[in-house]
Amino acid sequence: MKKLTAIAAFCLVVAFGYAKGASESKSAPKGEIIVSAAASLTDAMNELIALYGNSPDRVTVKATYGSSGALQAQIEQGAPVDLFVSASPKQMNALEAKGLLLAGTRKDLLKNAVALVVAPQSELTLSSFEDAALPAVTRIALGDFKSVPAGQYAEQAFTALGILEDVSRKAVFAKDVRQVLAWVESGEADCGVVYATDAAVSKAVSVAAVAPEGSHSPVVYPAAVVASSANPEAAKAFLAWLSGAEARKVFNAYGFSEP
């Protein structure tokens, strides 16, 4: 009788353990999410993803970076993306118009500023955006006007200042804002237009000027879950975390501000 009781108790323990394990398995995160984010977010997002991964109750987050226009095109072509963070509303608007965003998930996440930068060793004495048109500037690095938001903001600013034609004649166009930064850092360009946050993370450039107030659209970074996401709940959870106080401290440290 005692033997039967012991066996029954053992079976109960095993059953309880199995049920508990099954319950934990259902509540535990599964799989991963892929975030497509503007190149200017690279440093901040990498740090945030590492911070997010410190908790065992969260899914794995992987990121791909590039110009917002290129990332938009990838999503339109069916790339397996769960969350998109753009450096401009333009690309997000295009995806929303095509029904490619999960309804109710779009939100403005961050703000930034646009800066004219030069390499510290440069002999140029630039102090305003207008100075980009000076004859002393022979090569200016800009993001591609068609696909790179930083380039589009620069185009707006130079148009507002009446010097777009002069600047365009000596422009070299980059695939994303980080390539602009690299060209100025290496001396391949005399100056370039990047985000203030890009200038802040570089030890090889200095800010000559910030674009005049009102010369371009506000630099707003919208984010949204992609409608075709394979893991929309996890993507929404990560976006909610990115909008919270813990992530905000990291974004602020890199120079981003609240929208």
Image (cartoon, rainbow, N blue to C red):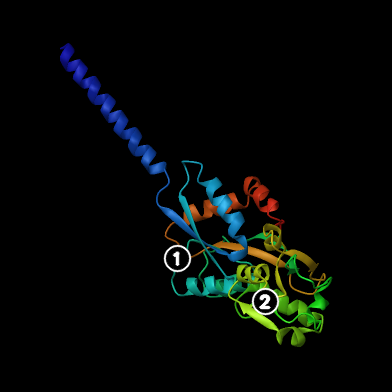
Q: Quadrant of the C terminus?
A: bottom right
Q: Quadrant of residue 213?
A: bottom right
Q: Amino acid at mark 2?
A: Leu
Number of marks present in the image shown = 2
Q: Nearer the viewer, mark 1 or mark 2?
A: 2
Residue drawn at the location 62% of the way across and 63% of the way down: 40
Disc number at residue 143? none
Q: Are marks 1 and 2 in contact (CB under 8 Å)?
A: no
Is the residue marked by circle 1 packed among few (<14), some (14-19), or many (20+) residues within 10 Å? Answer: some
Residue drawn at the location 45% of the way across and 50% of the way down: 60
Front position in the image: 234 or 221: 221
Residue drawn at the location 63% of the way across and 79% of the way down: 173
Residue 144: in sight, yes or no?
A: no
Q: Is residue 1 left or right of residue 228?
A: left
Q: Quadrant of residue 198?
A: bottom right
Position of residue 5 relative to residue 153, above or below, is above
Q: Secondary structure at mark 2?
A: strand
Residue drawn at the location 26% of the way across and 28% of the way down: 14
Look at mark 1 in the image and give the residue it sits on.
Answer: 228
Look at mark 2 in the image and give the residue it sits on.
Answer: 142
Q: Where residue 124 sits: x, y (%)?
A: 80, 73
Q: Secondary structure at mark 1?
A: loop
Q: Amino acid at mark 1?
A: Ser
Front position in the image: 221 or 154: 154
Q: Where residue 32 sits: x, y (%)?
A: 43, 53
